[in-house]
Image (cartoon, rainbow, N blue to C red):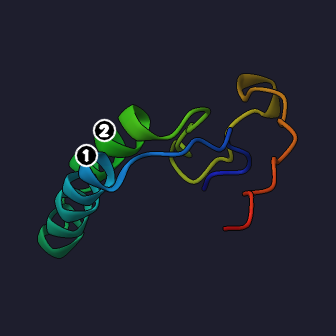
Amino acid sequence: MIRRAVEDRWPWARLEPLLADVAQACDAGDDARIVARLREAVAGYVPEASGTPASESALPAPQPVQPIPAG
């Protein structure tokens, strides 16, 4: 479970292949590949080990959310 993550903006050209790879890994039931891709992509991602929640101290402090300008 991801308890906290630092938000980041990715261009579609970077996000689309990541989503496709994660979807393929989900379809294949490849948990190791899913975890590996999330570790690469999500700042602060720490997976649960054996059903035990990750330590809060292992995660970065939450960052304020910046609104997206209209337009």
Relative placement, left or right, of 1 versus 3 is left
Cα–Cα gap, marks 1 and 2: 6 Å
Q: Quadrant of residue 17 in the image? A: bottom left
**Pointer 1 with pointer 2, Cβ within 8 A:** yes
- The x, y position of residue 53, in whole percent, is 68, 47
Which is more toward the observer, 57 or 52? 57
Residue type beneath disc 2: Ala
Which of these two is toward me, 14 or 54?
A: 14
49, 47: nearer the viewer:
47
Q: Nearer the viewer, mark 1 or mark 2?
A: 2
Query: As displayed, is residue 12 above or below residue 50?
Result: below
Element type at mark 2: helix
Residue located 14% across and 67% down the image: 24
User: Identity of the amino acid at label 1?
Assistant: Ala
Most extreme residue toward the front is: 71
Q: Tell me which residue sits at (65%, 44%) in the image.
A: 7
Q: Residue at x 38, y 48 (%)?
A: 11
Quarter placement of the C terminus = bottom right
Residue 36 circle label? 2
Q: Residue furthest bottom?
A: 27
Residue linked to disc 1: 32
Could you say where residue 15 lies in the image, as x and y percent from the top left? 32, 53
Q: Secondary structure at mark 1?
A: helix
* Badge 1: residue crowd in 10 Å (few <14, some 14–19, many ≥20): few
